[in-house]
Image: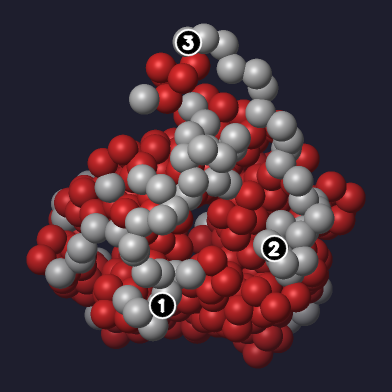
Amino acid sequence: MSATTDVKQGIREHLGQFSLHVLLVFATGLTIGSERTVVPALGEDVLGVESFLVIGSFVVSFGVVKSILNLYAGKWGEEYGRRPVLVAGWVTALPLPVILIFAPSWGWITVGNVLLGINQALTWSMAINAKIDLASPDERGLAVGIDESFGYTGVAVGAWVTGVIASRWSLRPEPFYFLAAVVVLAFLVSVFLIRETVQYAQAEGDDDDRDANLPFKEVVKRATYGDRTLFAAAQAGHIENFVDTLFWIAVPLYLLNQGLDIAAVGAVVGVHSAMYFLQIGTGGLADRIGRRPPVVAGMFLAGAGVLGMVLVEGYLAWAALAGVSGFGMALLYPNLMTVPSDAAHPTWRSAGMGVYRMWRDSGYAVGAILIGLAMEFVNAEAAFYLTAVLMFLSGAIVVVWMEETHPEFGTHEPPAPAPESPAEPAARE
């Protein structure tokens, strides 16, 4: 479809559908947030798991599945449309509360997190792509910021609510009744109220552009190592998810061992995630000043917040530094994701975003292994030091290699495509 097709983009023009996608990404955040506080404590206190590395295994299964499905969710979103992929994501979440309520061993929790990884990959990938489809090009940072802020506000609310429920009743089943209600409502909204948006991306692109309709294999190469700016974004996304993993595995157990009760732990984890709501502002800010400045600042600020948490003591100090690291993540998270959306042609934007999200969310698996090893063989504090150092090193790569991609301020030029072989045009059809 050519760019001349009469399809109007803009958040205001599509406020109803845009708002429904905001509601669904909030539900996606609630779904994963419902595990953040309760599940690590469940493994230690109810299921008798003593190994930090084993406890981290449920995040490894989540990260591996989510990263792979992110890659293909983008591809499927181009081929079949956003809506079918979104509905499939909510279907996979329906058994999750049942598994968490009745799981007799930690292995069942790990299996449940495979379903969570599928759910998060398909629903969040399509939520962000649908918002970008509906928004005009000069609202792209704002659209991503709104998506991520409401998604991670959902994470914060889910962690806080389930922590409160667990402190008043028990670690299970009560917190997962809340999760069940969220999943069922989100499934019904996606089936009965959401409309397709892929036509807006198709109308935006010019099929005659030399960069249009890249084969999927070429998209993977371009977004992984074929472009230094996109490589810098991918590695930064990979490492910054170590922070998210730290707050999922290490922070709850560390704070519990420091004497905080489960409700207070949920509040500290919630403060970190609640700062992600600021992405509404930081995504819009990047529309005005460019993507690179907030990404650079966020990498170093998030690392500093993580480092500070093991240098202080007390509930208020931990909560404050959790907020600092969360603010750093709010600066970098939406704007790293906007880099591939800026650089990609609309005909393969969803696939390019999928490649970025694959590398970003594989950070859950790698981070869970490294953080689990540090906690197992050194101590909990070592996991915080490791994460902080890697954030500083990754930030340095961003400083050196990432060019600006904002259409107005950008210095980034995509590499020229390789000459086509005679078979390539047919492969694109």
**Considering the image in quadrants, where does the C terminus appear?**
top left
- Residue 164 vertical placement versus 414 (above, below): below
Which percent across, then down, holds residue 84? Answer: 21, 49
Q: Residue at x 41, y 43 (%)?
A: 74
- Under mark 1, the amino acid is Ile
Q: Quadrant of residue 260?
A: bottom right
Look at discs 3 and 1 and give the one toward the viewer: 3
Q: Residue at x 57, y 11 (%)?
A: 421
Look at discs 2 and 3 and give the one toward the viewer: 3
Neighbours of disc 1 within 10 Å: few (<14), some (14-19), many (20+): many
Neighbours of disc 3 within 10 Å: few (<14), some (14-19), many (20+): few
Which comes sooner in the sequence, label 2 or label 1?
A: 1
**Label disc, if present, on residue 416 of the rendered structure:** none
- Under mark 3, the amino acid is Ala
**Considering the image in quadrants, where does the N terminus appear?**
top left
Q: Which residue is mark 3?
A: 423
Judge by depth and name the residue closer to the eye, 324 or 298. Answer: 298
Which comes sooner in the sequence, label 3 or label 1?
A: 1
- Under mark 2, the amino acid is His
Q: Quadrant of residue 135?
A: bottom left
Q: Which residue is mark 1?
A: 11
Q: CA distance from mark 3 to mark 1?
A: 40 Å
